[in-house]
Image: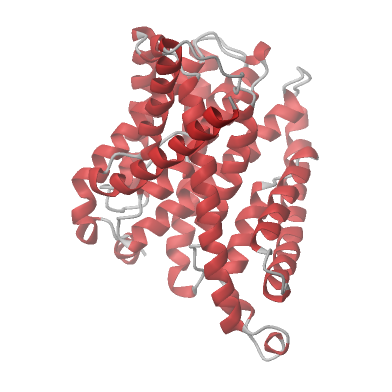
Amino acid sequence: MTYYLIIALCIIIIIAYLIEITGKHTKIPGVILLIFTGIGTNYFLAYMDIQIPDLSGLLPMMGTIGLVLIVLEGSLDLTISVKRKRLILTSVSSAILLFMIFVAISTFVAVKVWNFPLIPALLNIIPLGIISSAVAIPSSSDLHKDTREFITYESSISDIFGILVFDFILYRYSSGDFKYSSIGQGIFGFSFDLLITIIASVILSTGLAFLLHRIGHRVKHVIITTGIVLVYALARLVHMPSLLVVLVFGLVMNNSHLFKNAYSQKFINFDNFINELKSFKHITGEFTFIVRSFFFVIFGYYTSVNDLIDLRNLLIAVSISAFIFILRALYLKLVLRMPVKPLVFFAPRGLITILLFLSIPVDQLLPFMNKGLITQIIFVSILLMSFGNIIFTGKSSELSVPSQSFKNSS
């Protein structure tokens, strides 16, 4: 049995790799193919009458580690400079405002039209408002550099902000003691936690970056990555905005030029540090690929085909997805005055939506919310993104340069 398991793991990695390299040509996101690989594996094992241990309990753990690695990988490619100030501000505002508008309108409908309680409505709607960096970042690799950076910042901030708001609601108000008078106090506590986390993240990130440069042992990239995951987990236990630590660490690592001065050069050889950073990026990319691949294959394995083809769920999924993309198109066109294509298509739902959905207490789930609906929304949003990627990638130099629109809107 041991060798069969080893063979199966190796085959999954090889299939994921083939999906990764062929995806650049087919423009089909690997997430869809990985989920279908899991579904196919389930049917194959059932046909062969092969029993395997229940692996569904691994999903939250693998998804969390995958999230940390994906945000870390994305942030390691982000550059902070005065020239990119407008791009950064616009992408961050897009992530936060679009999320808030979607949640506000959807919650209003759920509470006022369908008469659902406020807190359960928020907990169920928030996961649907978050762009998945796990899907969006890898899928934007062939777009124009400015567009790719916009998507990386937007999806990463969407992940972080969405999780912060979800945790804020879940840990402070899901117990049923919600009072409107306590909102101000809750927001103040939330803002204080955010400020403390940012300060601690900068200090911690600077220390870890210095360690990466100073450690002489051949095993160091794994230790630094482990340290980041550990800090993330510890921060989550005390309900701090832990994903912010990951983002700040990546930004500090990839923007060492901001810390370069006569004093710092006494302790750090920045040329050597850049070489170390390249190796660290490579290792992070390898880890991310493996964890992400296994997560979506296992998720697909436990996905019911009957749930995927349920027409009632599909109608709701298409309606929610249509609202997401119409709202996004209007925001890009009317508020940001940016080229709508292909950015409008890059709003997929994915890993974060799954993880937060699994975190909702059973007694807080709305009647129509189920795993099948979540999976359908993910599929529809990813298929729309695939369409945009296929149609507009070749034209990205003409249609997808946010910085051009920034100048026009300023």
Place residue 308 in its image quadrant: top left
Which residue does the image show at 78% across and 38% down from the upper left? Answer: 237
Left or right of residue 223, residue 32 in this image: left
9, above or below 315, in the image? below
Residue at image x 26%, y 45%? 389
240 on left or right of 32? right
The N terminus: image quadrant = top right
Q: Nearer the viewer, residue 62 or 44?
A: 44
Can residue 320 be seen?
yes
Q: Residue 121, position in %: x, y?
A: 58, 19
Q: Position of residue 163 (x, y in %)?
A: 62, 38
What colour scheme was applied to this rendering of the protein?
A: secondary structure
Quadrant of the snapshot with the C terminus = bottom left
Considering depth in this image, is 267 or 95 the residue closer to the camera?
267
Q: Is residue 266 above or below residue 6?
A: below
The picture places residue 196, in percent across and down from the top left corner, at 77, 54
Identified at 42% across, 49% down, the residue is 137
The total number of labels drawn is 0
| Relative to 154, residue 313 above or below | above
Q: Nearer the viewer, residue 178 or 85?
A: 85
Camera-side residue: 94 or 289? 289
**Picture quadrant of residue 345:** top left
Indicate the position of residue 160 as horizontal and vertical percent values.
59, 45
Q: Is residue 225 left or right of residue 375?
A: right
- The image quadrant of residue 181 is top right
> Is any atom of residue 96 visible in this view?
no
